[in-house]
Image (cartoon, coloured by chain):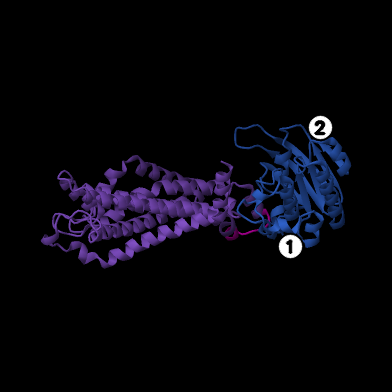
Chain colours: A purple, B blue
Amino acid sequence: MTKNTKKGTFMIKKWNRRQRLVLWLVLSLIFLAAVCIGGMFCGDAARETDFARKNIAPCLKYPFGTDWLGRDMFTRTVKGLSISIIIGISAAAFSAVMAFILGVLSATMGKAVDTVITWFIDLVMGIPHMLLLILICVACGRGLKGVILGVALTHWTSLARLIRGEVLQLKEQQYIKMARKLGKSNFYIAMKHMVPHLFPQFLVGLILLFPHAILHESSITFLGFGLSNEQPAIGIILSEAMKYLITGKWWLALFPGLMLVLTVVCFYTVGEGIRKLVDPASAHE
Amino acid sequence: MILEARNISFRYGEKSREILKDFSLKAESTERVGLVAPSGFGKTTLCKILSGYEKPDSGQVLLDGKPLDFYGSYCPVQLIWQHPEQAINPRLRMKSVLEEGDNVSPDLIKRLGIEADWMNRFPAELSGGEMQRFCIARALGQRTQFLLADEISTMLDLITQSQIWHFLMDETEKRKIGMIVVSHSPELLEKVCTRIVDLQKE
């Protein structure tokens, strides 16, 4: 018993929390980068059909198996994920920027602006995500642009509300009032006191938007309102696989689904890792 | 220099009760004025008004006959808050906290008992008394003419209290900085102050 605990503490000492976090961060980033770069090169391979190799169960040559048209599921999954990641990044970046601008404006521009923006946030939040997403996608014409716009326009609200609350709270802090009395300019206070406090929260909000965006992209494509059928997006793969699941071709849905979950987990790990790394409480760990 | 509050009235919000009513006070930079009053009499509010954190509803705060705004962006009347942990940004290391003050002299920092080792720490890694020393040092920049101490030693042990008060009496006498001290402890005020004002009797 004592031996075990001793060994346990030894392990923790060897790799402290900060180092373990960095390790996970790097692994997640490598995985995401690999998927992105892989997706760029296997676009053609993902569309190639070959009836000589259709319906093969997972083996060494085709680790994820092949489908009813003889397409390699591995390349299709990688390509689909890379599309998902691109959509996730652009949608999350777009909505985070929008949230930041609206949040800061709302907190600093006075009561009238604040009322309008808060009302608008409530309005967008009041409409179910999926409904709004489908409407925007259909209005923009199906495809990448529609999905990105749809996800971006439905996901900025919670982050905007968070940033507004933070800025309002910061403005009343004693140390910020004190800095003003010590003759510091608004710019100094914004850069030295506000940004270091807001940035980590903003960054984490941004990164945690990725998995949301990816999941929404897949689900809307699965429902048939998102990307067109020719593109090997994860949602398309999953919805097509549905028809073949009953005939026992389990690998068509399992591997793409697992990879999707893995990607989402990776983004969460990166987000949580960065949040912990920038927290001053962990500075000396 | 003379810090003067002239006929000050103040209330928080429209409908709340009037905390200060037609209050006047005059303090010279050669004296240390003690303020006593039971809880809720507006001692902290008065300190905030005197150092420009709050604007009085009527009346004026004058330093040598001129309003505080006249002296530019650095306020010559500095307030030391009761809770140091709220007056320091938890994300800044202590050395950057000191840099915010107006060229605080290294000699002063040393005499306050601040150790070089503390400079690289975050506020969460210091005790309340250690943080309060930083707050005092920060408020004693070059251009400070008046110092308001709002219950600054209530959370400290007796040895630290006496160390800090000896330092403050020394420093303010040397630089001719006026002080207004708020405390619940009559013994402390009797030791430290040259004059005691009871808000209740005013």
Read off the magenta span. A181-188
Q: Nearer the viewer, residue A185 or A67?
A: A67
Q: Is residue A187 magenta?
A: yes
Label 2: few (<14), some (14–19) or many (≥20) C-alpha neighbours in 10 Å: few
Judging from the image, what secondary structure is the residue with disc 2 in? Answer: loop
Q: Is residue A27 magenta?
A: no
The structure residue drawn at horizontal position 79% and vertical position 54%, both measured from the top left corner, is B113
Q: Which x, y percent locates residue B53? A: 67, 47
Position of B106 compared to B95: left or right?
Answer: right
Q: Mark 2: which amino acid? A: Lys
Judging from the image, what secondary structure is the residue with disc 1 in? Answer: loop
Can you identify the residue that label 1 sits on?
B103
For disc 2, the chain is: B
Position of B31 compared to B97: left or right?
Answer: right
Q: Mark 1: which amino acid? A: Asn
Quarter of the image that includes the C terminus of chain B: top right
